[in-house]
Amino acid sequence: MHQHTGTLHPSTAVVALGRPDPSPDAPLNPPISLSSTFVGSGSPQPGERMYARMSNPTWDGLEEAIASLEGCDVPALAYASRMAAVAAVLSLVPVGGVAAVPAASYNGTIGLARRLAAEGRFELREIDPTDVPATLDLLRGADLVWLESPTNPLLEVLDLPALIAGARSAGALVAVDNTFSTPLRQRPLAVGADLVVHSATKFIAGHSDVLLGAVVARDAELRAQLLAQRTLHGSVAGPFEAWLALRGLRTLALRLDRAEASAGELALRLAAAPGVTRVRYPGLPSDPFHALAAAQLDGFGALVSIELGTASRADAFVGALRLVTPATSLGGVESLAERRRRQPSEPVQVPESLVRLSIGIEHVEDLWADLAQALAAAS
Ligand SMILES: *Cc1c(COP(=O)(O)O)cnc(C)c1O
């Protein structure tokens, strides 16, 4: 693979990283390698590909690119989904150890942590990392701390430097979910995180057509541990999915710039719209997390959460949308809306009337026209 250093701007890096060496007649893009097994050399060699659960050339460019964007020269690990990546990271907690996970995490994350704790795998401490002193108290004796910032779907921004420093002095590994910000807006390894986790299903792949997770580990030893686990669990990414994710990554900077600009404008308009009781968007100067977000992030992202008073008004709003699609998930080119509490597994910290908007790359005025007509229809 063609190794680039960190001297490129991120918007160039997403285009240039993870390509085959540019020798004559080499393909410009990494080909999809659809093979379950690889020809051996007779006697096993170190680094031999062997079998597609262990290694696949289609992963290489993507794993190199994601890690490099996170400022890491140890390749990332691609997983079948981000939940497979969460399971892998939680497996780093020793049996009988302590995992600290935010109670208001993405519902799959906290759901898996609760299940593992109920099975006796580890002790779970549910934290509210927006309260730094209380969280630091709970981190004593923890083996692993999970952080997500901005959070899904409350869009709360955590004081990552303070939390990570506290966790590390308690001797815990720190994993940060960077799905919402992407490495173009936040690089948690630079503030001391040990692991960065992505749902590449979202902004990285960017077209709502792939399930894929990724973990970036700070050092080769941690990566080797995760690689051994991934090989045994078989939680590997399909080569086609990995290829699509790298293809999507090429336009990440463009897509995110556009969607984020629209999200900022729509957040302002929604904040002034009748019937909207609260807009959560860290880019709004009035947002309680604005100062932290401005200090930590290179951009405020493309997610906007609004509250509409009651669940039935929120359902009426989502039902009246014509351009924005009612669907879960986020980070694709098309705008989506979801009342999160329609899912029974959603944490109770999320207000019943909260609708999460994932802003896509459509024209901002078309998006506003749709949101405005749906607000009027729901009032
Ligand atoms: C979507 C999402 C997930 C789940 O990702 P999968 O790739 O579907 O497993 C986890 N965490 C966050 C923050 C998400 O947005």
Image (cartoon, rainbow, N blue to C red):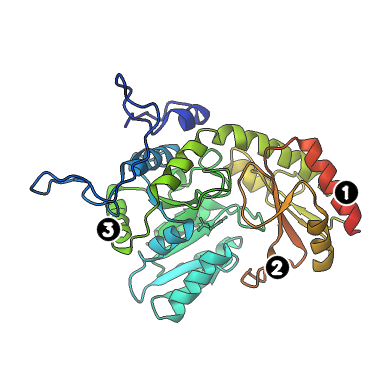
Estimate the spatial distance between the alpha carbons at disc 1 and disc 3, rounded to whole Å: 52 Å
What amino acid type is highlighted by mark number 1? Answer: Gln
From the image, which quarter does the N terminus lie in? Answer: top left
Q: Residue at 40% across / 61% down in the picture?
A: 89
Q: The residue tagged with tag 1: helix, strand or loop? A: helix
Estimate the spatial distance between the alpha carbons at disc 3 and disc 2, rounded to whole Å: 38 Å
What amino acid type is highlighted by mark number 2? Answer: Arg
* 302 vs 342: above or below: above
Locate residue 379, reporting x and y percent. Answer: 91, 58
Residue bearing the label numbered 2: 342
220 and 11: which is toward the camera: 11
Q: Residue furthest left?
A: 43
Q: Please indicate whether residue 317 sits to the left or right of residue 209 in the image.
A: right
Label drawn at residue 228: 3
Estimate the spatial distance between the alpha carbons at disc 2 and disc 1, rounded to whole Å: 22 Å
Q: The residue tagged with tag 2: helix, strand or loop? A: helix
Q: Residue at 67% across / 39% down in the picture?
A: 260
In this figure, what is the number of numbered marks?
3
Locate residue 281, reporting x and y percent. Answer: 71, 49
Locate residue 355, reporting x and y percent. Answer: 74, 58
267 and 14: which is toward the camera: 14
Which quadrant of the frame does ligand 1 lie within? bottom right
Mark 3 vs 2: CB contact within 8 A: no
32 and 128: which is toward the camera: 32
What amino acid type is highlighted by mark number 3? Answer: Ala
Q: Residue furthest top?
A: 24
Residue bearing the label numbered 1: 373
Sequence-wise first label, 3 or 2 = 3
Locate residue 6, reporting x and y percent. Answer: 41, 30
Q: The residue tagged with tag 3: helix, strand or loop? A: helix
